[in-house]
Image: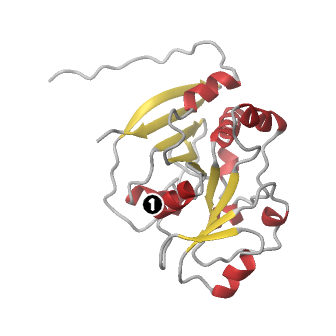
Amino acid sequence: MTEPAVFSLAPGGSLTDDDITAVYAVDDRASAWFRVNFVSSIDGAGTHDGLTAGLGTPADRRVFDILRRLSDVVLVGAGTVRAEGYGPMRLDAPGVDWRLAHGLSAQPVFCIVSASLDLDPAHRIFTDAPVRPVVVTVASAPSDRRSALGEVADVVVAGDTTVDISRTKSVLAERGLTQIHSEGGPRLFADALALDAVDEICLTISPFAEGPGAGRIVAGDTDGIQRRMSLASVLSSDGTLLLRYLRTPA
C-alpha cells in the first residue's frame, strides 16, 4: 500500500488583511455560496462556559471580521442570537471602506432564523440595525408575531413547520444575497449539513483543551451524515489554526 504524503506547514511571512481576504474570497459572487464559521477547542469543544467567545483569539477575531466583510448576509439561528448576546451588526470603518471600494453595500444584511419567531421587535438588533434585517421563518409561525416583526424586518418563509436551509439559501439568493456567512448555531449547522447545503467550512482551532461537558459545533437528531470536504488553506497565529474547507466536487 502506498503511504499517504504528509507535509509540514512551516510558518511564512505575516499576512496583511488584503492577503487574508484573498485567501477567503469567492471567485463567483453571483452564485449562492453558503459558508459556515465556527471555533473549536483542541479537544473538540464548541464553547467555553457555554459561549463561543471564551474560545476566541485575536487571530480568530481578525479572520471573523474579514469573513463578515466579504459576505452579503450574516445568517444566525435565533437561539445563538440570544445565547451569545448579539446586538445590531455593524462593520467598522475599514470594513465599510473596503466594501464600498469593491462595489458592495456599506453593510451586510443580518438574518435571523427562527421557526417560532420568539423575537422582540423592540430589541436593538432590529431598532439600531444599519440595514433592515431579514427573519427567515416557517409558514406555521404565529401570525401575530410575524406581523409585529414585519414592522422592523423583512420576514420570509422557507418551510412549512421547520426552516429548510436549502430553501433559505435560495430565498436569500433571490434577494441578491448570494454570499451567505453563517455563524451558527450547532443545530442550524446540522440542518445545513443534512441537506448538503454547506459549500465552505471555516474552522478555527483554538489552543485550549476544555475537557468534558461542552457541546460540539454541530448538534441535532440527524445521524449518519458524512460530507467529504477539501482542505483549501491553513493559517496560523500564536497557536491558533484557521482552517478553510470547501465542498469536494462531485
Q: Which quarter of the figure is the N terminus placed in?
A: top left
Q: How is the image coloured?
A: secondary structure
Label 1 Cα neighbours within 10 Å, binned few <14 / some 14-19 / many ≥20 = some
Quick check: 58 left or right of 236? right
Report the number of numbered marks.
1
The amino acid type, in three-letter code, at marker 1 is Ser
Q: Position of residue 193 (x, y in %)?
A: 42, 55
Residue 68 visible in the current orientation? yes
In the shown orientation, is residue 220 left or right of residue 25?
A: left
Q: Quadrant of the C terminus?
A: top left
Residue sitting at 56 percent across and 27 percent down? 23
- Which residue is at the front of the view, 9 or 27? 27
Nearer to the camera, 160 or 200: 160
Q: Which residue is mark 1?
A: 166
The answer to whether residue 213 shows anywhere in this view is: no
Q: What is the x, y in percent for residue 188?
A: 52, 61
Which residue is found at the position 70% from the left and 39% from the top?
65
